[in-house]
Image (tube, rainbow, N blue to C red):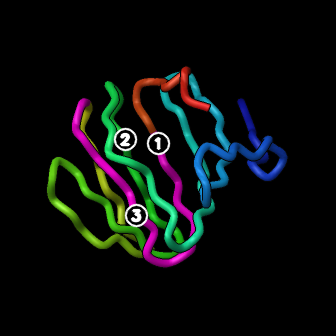
Amino acid sequence: MAIIDTLQLEVLNKRPGWRGRLFHSQNNTFVWWDFDAGADIHQHDHEQEEVWHVIEGELELTIGGASARCGPGTAAIIPPNTPHAVRVLRAGRALVVDHPLRLGFG
């Protein structure tokens, strides 16, 4: 059994306004993100399916050209190889899971 205390993980400062704590299971990559209002992630794609679960705050996610506002409790599923971007509307937190592993991230 593996137990991970995410509060003990090193903070990843991947982009301005984004602070993450990354870990892997056998099949998935997980990142707990804390984000600031106005921060963004440019449009990109990757081979992994990606799921964003918004815990606090509000994001605008653009997936395959369609945009949606996502607040607490919202889960957004991004298919593999699909262009997507994120803009923070209100500071908060989200859990992002990639499958399969995204070993080069971080």
Q: Residues within 10 Å of mark 1 (few under 14, many from 20)?
A: many
Label 2 neighbour load within 10 Å: few <14, some 14-19, many 20+: many
Q: Earlier in the sequence, mark 1 or mark 3?
A: 3
Question: Residue 91's x, y, as percent?
Answer: 56, 74
Residue 49 lies, in percent from the top left, at 32, 35
For discs 2 and 3, the disc positioned in front in the rendered view: 3
Q: Quick check: 75 above or below 90?
A: above
In space, the residues marked 2 and 3 are separated at their CA atoms by 16 Å
Q: Which mark is residue 68?
A: none
- Residue position marked by numbered label 1 in the rendering: 97
Indicate whether residue 83 is drawn in magenta.
Answer: yes
Residue at point 46%, 65% (across, down): 54
Give the CA separation, mark 2 to mark 1: 6 Å
**Residue marked by disc 2:** 50
Look at discs 1 and 3 and give the one toward the viewer: 3
Q: Quadrant of the C terminus?
A: top right
Q: Is residue 18 above or below residue 44?
A: below
Q: Is label 2 in contact with label 1 (beta carbons under 8 Å)?
A: yes
State whether residue 44 is above or below residue 77. above
Q: Nearer the viewer, residue 7 or 88?
A: 88
Identify residue for label 3. Answer: 87
The amino acid type of the residue labelled 3 equals Arg
Secondary structure beneath disc 3?
A: strand
Rendered location of residue 80, percent (x, y): 26, 32
User: What's under tag 1, amino acid-wise?
Assistant: Val
Instruction: Please tell me how crowded label 3 is: few (under 14), some (14-19), or many (20+) other residues with Cα within 10 Å.
Output: some
The first of marks 2 and 3 along the sequence is 2
